Image (cartoon, rainbow, N blue to C red):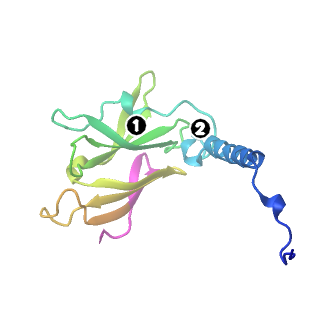
């Protein structure tokens, strides 16, 4: 019998106990990742800078608000939402991206800021993008008191509604008692 030049690897065979230990470790990592929350989902204290952390009342639920969309009998669909204290008052606001449920094509979206009214339920306090602007929303986030979005649009009426050919990155921030849109990158073709 000839001896092998390679060390004995008999101890490297995986046994069920090894697979069980690996599965347990992976489950622990996934569970820990699920417990972490992004900073933008936590409201700030009254008088503090927008986007700082503290526990507060829950953010307004877009499902509890009549959004100003004219859908001609179709349902309204909230496609994206994010929350945070945008105006530094200690109460979280919710920013909702919504459109009509058209079933095909790319219906235009609206971006709405929702807040809880004192002694009442949630209401729309600002419209950042009107559906009449015929834009849809790509990337979208609320972080550190700033709303960012990528608006998708059309260079001409001949461009099919399924395929926006322009995009513009924009952001809004609460300044002087209103949401101010910062100059975004130049619109560009996709």
Circle 1 packing at 10 Å, graded few (<14), some (14-19), many (20+), is many
Asked if residue 3 lies left or right of residue 100, the reply is: right
Residue 32 screen position, x and y as percent: 68, 44
Residue range highlighted in magenta: 170-190
Mark yes or no: residue 51 visible: no
Q: Which residue is mark 2?
A: 46
Q: Does the magenta run of residues contain 79?
A: no
The foreground one among 152 and 83 is 152
Q: Quadrant of the C terminus?
A: bottom left
Q: Residue at x 13, y 61 (%)?
A: 157
Residue 189 vs 98, above or below: the answer is below
Q: Residue furthest front?
A: 1
Mark yes or no: residue 127 visible: yes
Residue 19 screen position, x and y as percent: 72, 48
Q: Which residue is mark 1?
A: 114
Q: Residue at x 73, y 44 (%)?
A: 20
Q: Earlier in the sequence, mark 2 or mark 1?
A: 2
Separation (CA) of disc 2 from disc 1: 18 Å
Element type at mark 2 = loop
């Amino acid at each position: 019998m000839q001896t092998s030049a390679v060390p004995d690897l008999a101890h490297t065979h995986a046994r069920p106990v090894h697979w069980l230990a690996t599965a347990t470790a992976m489950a622990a990592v996934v569970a820990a990742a699920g417990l972490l929350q992004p900073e933008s989902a936590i409201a700030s204290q009254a008088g503090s800078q927008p986007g700082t952390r503290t526990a507060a009342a829950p953010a307004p639920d877009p499902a509890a608000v009549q959004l100003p969309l004219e859908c001609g009998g179709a349902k309204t669909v909230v496609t994206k939402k994010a929350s945070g204290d945008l105006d530094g008052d200690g109460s979280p606001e919710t920013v909702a991206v919504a459109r009509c449920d058209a079933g095909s094509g790319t219906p235009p979206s609206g971006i709405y800021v929702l807040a809880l009214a004192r002694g009442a339920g949630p209401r729309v306090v600002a419209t950042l993008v009107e559906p009449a602007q015929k834009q849809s929303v790509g990337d979208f986030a609320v972080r550190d008191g700033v709303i960012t979005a990528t608006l998708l649009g059309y260079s001409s009426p001949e461009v099919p509604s399924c395929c926006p050919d322009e995009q513009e990155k924009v952001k809004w921030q609460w300044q002087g008692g209103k949401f101010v849109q910062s100059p975004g990158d130049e619109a560009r073709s996709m």
